[in-house]
Structure formats: structure tokens, C-alpha cells
Amino acid sequence: FIEKILVNSPEFVSNIKSFYPWSLFDWVDPKGYRIINSQIGRIPNAPMKVNDSYTLTCPKHPWTLQVSHPTIGNTSGMWVIPTGLGVLNEKNEYLGTLKLVRSG
């Protein structure tokens, strides 16, 4: 779903890139791999494993915002506060984590 939004909305992606030097969101799959990035789109080749604390708590507490310690962002190189929101489908199956980043 997230990938379709990015692939089918080049204007949306262009607007994000022009206003924000960092990624506004990533999609992290159920295994903890970042596979989609709001700046890049689908991440080519080997996806990057996310090691923030929220990747462990989001599956246990879906639909509840989880916050990690401030860190240097992978995309921006700036200090960010990573957060995540676990997402379930209508059958209560864990689909992954919407990673949201606050910078500045």
C-alpha cells in the first residue's frame, strides 16, 4: 500500500523532497527491514535492518506510537527522534511498522 502511494504519486514524493531534507517516514516490514523510504521510494538491493527499540515494541503494541532514543538519521545525517506505529490488517495480522521521524 505505502509503495503504491509513492510509486503512483511522483508529485507527492517531489514535494516531500523539496520541503524536508530528511525522510518523513519509512515502511519497516514484519522482520524489521526498512523496505520503503519517503525520500527514496522502494529501497533497492538489500533492505536495511532497523535496530531502533520501537521495532521490537511495535508488533507487541500495534496502533500505539512507540518512541526511540534520539539518534543520527541514516538519510539526513541530522539528529532525529525515531518513532514507529505498528500496523495490523483487518484480520489482526501484523503488516509492519510505519516509521515516523521528527528532526530539528
Image: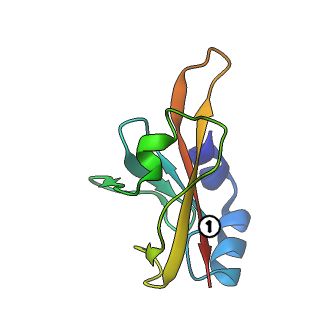
Q: Nearer the viewer, residue 27 or 54?
A: 54
Residue at image location 41% in from the left, 43% down from the top = 56
Quarter of the image containing the C terminus?
bottom right
Residue at image location 58% in from the left, 83% down from the top = 21
Image coordinates of residue 73 in percent, x first then y, are: 44, 75
Residue at image location 40% in from the left, 57% down from the top = 52
- In the image, residue 103 above or below residue 63: below
Residue at image location 72% in from the left, 66% down from the top = 11
Image coordinates of residue 3 in percent, x first then y, are: 57, 46
Identify the element where label 1 is drawn. Answer: loop
Image coordinates of residue 12 in percent, x first then y, are: 72, 64
In the rendered structure, which amino acid carries the disc numbered 1? Answer: Leu
Q: Please tell me in which quadrant of the rendered image residue 72 appears.
A: bottom left
Q: Is residue 98 left or right of residue 48?
A: right
Extreme residue in the left direction: 46
Residue occupied by mark 1: 24
- In the image, residue 18 above or below residue 86: below
Image coordinates of residue 80 in percent, x first then y, are: 53, 76
